[in-house]
Amino acid sequence: MAQSQWLWVGALLGVALLAPTARASFSPPKGGGYGEIWRLATIAEERAQMPGFAAFALAVATSESRGKNTAANTSESEARYACKLYEANADTRYKDNPHSAERWCFGSGGWFGFMPATALSGKAFRHMDPYMVFDPAASVAFLADYVRRVVNGYWKKLPPSCRNWLTIRRFMASNKVGLDCDETNYDRSFRVREKLGTNLMERGLPANMMYGGVTIGNWPGGWELYQLLASFEGDVEPAVLEEDIPDMSHQTGEDQ
């Protein structure tokens, strides 16, 4: 592995926490879903100066989609909640979005299991098609922007020891879980930690990477990041932009 590809490891952990055996066990994935996630997320990590983002993206995609950008959870309960999130903001945040409610209300999907109303919450994305959660470049930009929003909105409310990737993952479950750094109020806080550790190790990464501090040194802007990533897109399935959600062979729905 080139030396530059390991720069994010030192920045993420701050100290040399990776044992030689753990370091040797990780090889960046090449080709396919995980390879493209790693490639695009590494570009985003370097551009936004967000050490550890690529590893986090791999772990989240392992849980949510198994690296398949067309994965979707279209269960009745998921679709109902996706619609609830959209309707709560339809007349404000998304009032200028030209797409019908149907396209917001299918459930969740893409590499990172986003509901459209969460993914498109950033100002740069509110005009986009909700089905862009299935687009590789857009979904990585959505995840990076989600991290930015959590950092800007909640880091001051949390002690420094909790400003890490585990907390970001917990916020993806709910704000209450995200704020439960000490695992004192919600059983799900514990389950998120256990699952994230498992997902990291599945990708050959050490579980303790979840405790790496999350910092953003140079945010380029959400739309600018998306355009950058789109210019580097590789050979993966295109964004789902048809009128109907396709029949997905893989459906997520497990606890985060």
Image: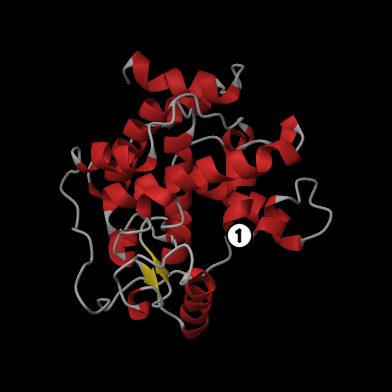
Residue 96 in the image: above or below residue 82: above
Residue 219 in the image: above or below residue 179: above
Which residue is pictured at 44% across the width and 61% down the height? 114
Quadrant assignment for the N terminus: top left
Please say whether residue 247 is visible from this viewpoint. yes
Q: Position of residue 19 (x, y in %)?
A: 57, 22
Q: Position of residue 203 (x, y in %)?
A: 44, 43
Residue 19 in the image: above or below residue 60: above
Quadrant assignment for the C terminus: bottom right
* Residue bearing the label numbered 1: 173
Please say whether residue 70 is visible from this viewpoint. no
Q: Describe residue 244's horizontal placement relative to residue 126 as left or right.
A: left
Q: Position of residue 243 (x, y in %)?
A: 21, 78
> Which residue is at the far right?
184
Which residue is pictured at 48% across the width and 57% down the height? 63
Q: What crowding class fits label 1: few (fewer than 14 Cα within 10 Å), some (14-19), or many (20 or more)?
A: some
- Identified by mark 1, the residue type is Ala
